[in-house]
Every structure is written in C-alpha cells, then in structure tokens.
Amino acid sequence: MAEKQSLYELLGLTGKATPADIQEAFESCRQALAREPDGEDRRNRLTFLQHARDVLSDPRQRALYDRRNREQHAAAVQEAKSARPLRPFLAMVLIAAAAYPAWRFIAADKPAPAVPAPAASAASAAPKTEPPIEEEIAALLPPAPVDPAPPGTASKPAAAPKPAPQKLVFAGPDAGILAKFSDSTYLIIGAAGLGTGVAIESDKLLTNCHVIAPNVLKGPILAINPATQEKTRITAAAFLIREDACVVHAPGLNGKPIAFGDAAQLARGARIFNIGFANGRLMASTGALLGIINRGGQNYLVSSNYCDHGVSGGPLVDEEGRLVGLTSGGPADRSVCLSLTAETARTVLAQTLIAIDAFPPNYMSNLTRRW
C-alpha cells in the first residue's frame, strides 16, 4: 500500500512551493481531471485538490498545517523509539467480553445448497430497480412455525421466537475461533461517533467508511486496544469510491493482523462469528449465513449474527477465524446482520492513503447504505 499523501503531494509539490506554484499545480491537475469522464470519482478528487489549494494558498492556514505536520512527525518518531511489544492481555479480553450479552443463533441441522458466487461485476449484478430490502431478507429467512389448530378452525402462524440474550464466554467449541480474532479487533472513536476496526497489518485497520467520515477534521480519531486500553491516533485513511470500505493508518498500533478468507466458499447455513463495540461495549455473537443480496452493486452477506450501533467495521469470520466479511449494519429491528464481503473490502488495500488533515471539511462517505 502506498504511503499517505500530504496536501503538497496531492498537488505534486514540495513544502518549498510558492503561491504561484500552488495555483499552477492546481490548474494543471484540474485540467487533467476535466479530460476524464464525469462521475463520483472525478468529483471527489477535485474536492480534495480544491481543499489542498485553499489551505496552502492561505499563509495562516498553511503555517498551521505545516506546524501540525511537524508535531505529528516528531510524535511518530518518538513512538517508534519507545514502541514495545504488546503483552498477552487475552485473559482481560475474555473476562470483559463475558460480562456483555450477545445473541446466539444456531445453524439448521441440514445445510442448504451452497450460496452462489458473487456476480462478475457490480454493474451487471445490480438490478435496475431493487426490491425493498425487507422483501429480500424475508425470502432468506426460514418460514415461521405453524401452531396446530383444532379441527374446523383456521390455523395461524406462530410469532417468530425472539432469541434470548446470552452471556458470551470464550469456552467450548467456539473458544479457539473467537480467540483468533478477538485480539485483532479495535474500537475506533472520534468526536462524532464510534465503530470497530480489524487489523490487517500491524499498523493498519480495515473498517467501514461511515465509521470514519463523521469524525474527519473534528478532533483526533483514535484506535483503542480493548485489552490494554492503549490509544493510538489515526493519521491517514484510504477509501473506495462506491463501496463502504476504508483502511486507516495508526502508526505504532502494533496490532495482530487477521487472515483473509473467501466469502464465496461459504455454504448457506455455515456458522460465522462477529465481534464489535455495540454501543461502545465489546460484544460477540455466533450466527448462520442466510444468503447473499446485492444492493446498489455491493454484495452483502446476510446472517443471523447480532448487529447494533458501533459494530460497524468489525470482523465477520468463518470457522477457521479467517475474515470473510466486514460487518456493516442491518435493518432497524436487528433481525439480521449485513456484512460487506471480504473480497470487496480488500480492494481498498490498493488505494493511496491520504493524511486525515488533508481531508476536506465536508468529506463524507460517498455511498448511500440501502437498508
């Protein structure tokens, strides 16, 4: 993955650039963009270029930006000198997690046929008119049981049983799976909201863009280790234009990278596991894969795992502890969980990191979640 870009680098300049150099570089970049087809990608890049020009052309803003860069660089150097390996705090994670409830769903006795592999391209997979999300989810759920009725009376479907909350204990057959990815999971928090991230490199976390977007330029965004409570500042991010996948850079994080799996190999009914900070509390759940739906060109795994505010960006893993999805949310009734596939999420790793301070003030995630 490329290193993060500064405002100067976005314009192809160095810190010695004059005001005339800045304007000339902006015009050159703008003209190059004008030759490309119109779309979200071009408009988003132009917004970043305009922000870079405006900040670097204003002497006061430029001085503040340069000073902030120097301070962050000095802090990064100091952290690198004093960095030390994390101690094994898994026991602390287990004790903390056991205090919080989680929903547990059990797969059917007989697994259904394998889930079809995602379509070759997002454009061909997305229907012109998408049915309501409730209809697609209902088609994946098993039918509700019917109460036996006395002869001569009409029978009516019984109300679907509500799953009882359970305390999560890392014990039994799932203990090894949960342990494999619990110490790769981090709380991501800023001034305007929180979510979850999963380590894919020692200093990089994969998360949803809608976790990062509300916090940009509203103060520090932190990645917090739930076992040690160590806080590491997020300094840069890369994102996809149309999909809700971002990767963030937190120098000195020293996380345990998770292994990638293959969502296309999952069979309907397969057991899958997720973990995240639901309303700020560490929670985990076991669920079953119900199927795959496509919304706006994005494939989502639909499962019976538990999802609530704050779980977004957390890992969804298979029985080997490998990442197969990125928990992205679900309907308001929390009946199911929707997760972006790992195949989609990992494409963000090829994108260029941009310094958080280089994001324009009006930056928001480009996608519209369709549920």
Image: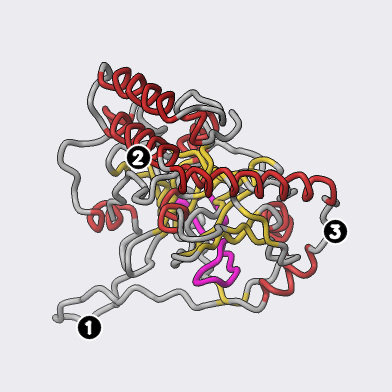
Q: Nearer the viewer, residue 106 or 252?
A: 252
Amino acid type at image mark 1 = Pro
User: Which residue is painted at 40% across and 23% down in the image?
Assistant: 25
Q: Establish if 232 lies above or below 260.
A: below
Amino acid type at image mark 2 = Gln
Colouring mode (rainbow / by chain / secondary structure / one colour): secondary structure
Residue 113: x, y in percent?
43, 41
Residue linked to disc 1: 150
Q: Residues within 10 Å of mark 2 (few under 14, many from 20)?
A: many
Q: What separation in Å lies between label 2 and label 1 (alpha carbons)? A: 47 Å
Q: Residues within 10 Å of mark 3 (few under 14, many from 20)?
A: few
Assign a secondary structure to mark 2.
Answer: strand
Residue 22 lies left or right of residue 370; in this view the side is right
Tell me if residue 284 is in the magenta stretch: yes
Precedes in sequence: disc 3 or disc 2: 3
Q: Exactly how many numbered labels are in the figure?
A: 3
Residue 263: x, y in percent?
50, 39
| Numbered label attached to residue 298 | 2
Q: Nearer the viewer, residue 103 or 146?
A: 103
Assign a secondary structure to mark 1.
Answer: loop
The reply to whether residue 280 is visible in this rendering is yes
